[in-house]
Image (cartoon, helix red, strand yellow):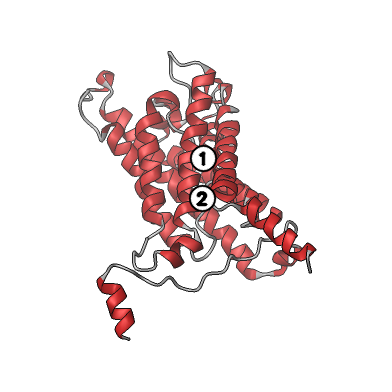
Amino acid sequence: MGKNVEGAEHGEFSAKDYHDPPPAPLFDPDELAQWSFYRALIAEFIATLLFLYITVLTVIGYKRQTDLKNNGDECGGVGILGIAWAFGGMIFILVYCTAGISGGHINPAVTFGLFLARKVSLIRAVMYMVAQCLGAICGVGLVKGFQKAYYVRYGGGANTLADGYNKGTGLGAEIIGTFVLVYTVFSATDPKRSARDSHVPVLAPLPIGFAVFMVHLATIPITGTGINPARSFGAAVIYNKEKAWDDQWIFWVGPFIGAAIAAIYHQFVLRAAAIKALGSFRSSAHV
């Protein structure tokens, strides 16, 4: 007792017992017979629907308020800062609400990164991506249904490469932006960190939401900020104009590359998974 008090006085804290969770199976057909699996799919669908509904409405509302041709105020509206807050804030809210049900991915790139790290099975990863894309389409569809005139006039919230930037710049922005997001997801949800820093409680949705906010501030002027293939795909499907499809590949390739780099960096560099696996192999070889 006295030792524990003395350690606390000197700023030393004992970490909780920690064990790495086993990797998720690559194929797990048993998931298809579990209600919890379908409940998670519904949660991802609804969360992505709400995410696109609020954020695309924010984008269109901002363009409407600043449209000088429609008696708008050039300095009015929420501005880029407000749009970034809308995206980051919604991610914070929705991850907080759905983390205990589906993990709160709400983004195929996040799901892809977690799959590469063996946090989810292939079946779950694929079905999550399908649910996310369908949710995004429905969310943007609601925006168009409620505000069709403004929706069409102001670009439908679709991601496009801004004038003055080449495809390489846009791809790079998506790769780095998604890396920041997925790296934050890994760090905020790392069970080892939770055990080691148990005296400093971390609300995982908060840093994840802030990561989305910061990336939007940096990349809205370049690509409108994708970093979420479902967000870009859903807006393109409903808007369905040639410009929305011209560079659609950037908003899939970029996020998936960024997510893969983040997964490799966190798992094999920071967590040294390859070295641990080699050590385990050598230990078993001497038995």
Q: Give the spatial CA distance, label 1 vs label 2.
A: 8 Å
> Going 52% across and 59% down the picture, which residue do you hit?
103
The one nearer the camera, 29 or 61, is 29
Name the residue at 27% across, 18% down: 69
Amino acid type shown at disc 1: Asn
Residue on which disc 2 sits: 106
Q: Nearer the viewer, residue 59 or 192?
A: 192
* Residue 44, placed above or below residue 217: below
- At x 42%, y 29%, the residue is 224
Q: Do callouts 1 and 2 mark residues in contact (Cβ within 8 Å)?
A: yes
Question: Which residue is more in the foreground, 43 or 7?
Answer: 7
Q: Quadrant of the N terminus?
A: bottom left
Left or right of residue 254: residue 59: left
- Element type at mark 2: loop
- Check disc 2 and give the amino acid type: Ile
Q: Residues within 10 Å of mark 2 (few under 14, many from 20)?
A: many
* Image location (x, y in percent) of residue 177: 46, 35
Residue 134 visible in the snapshot = no
Residue 65 rendering spot, x and y as whole percentages: 26, 30
Disc 1: which residue: 228
Is 132 left, or right, of 25 in this rendering?
left
**Label located before the other in sequence (1 or 2):** 2
Residue at horizontal 25 percent and vertical 73 percent from the top: 9
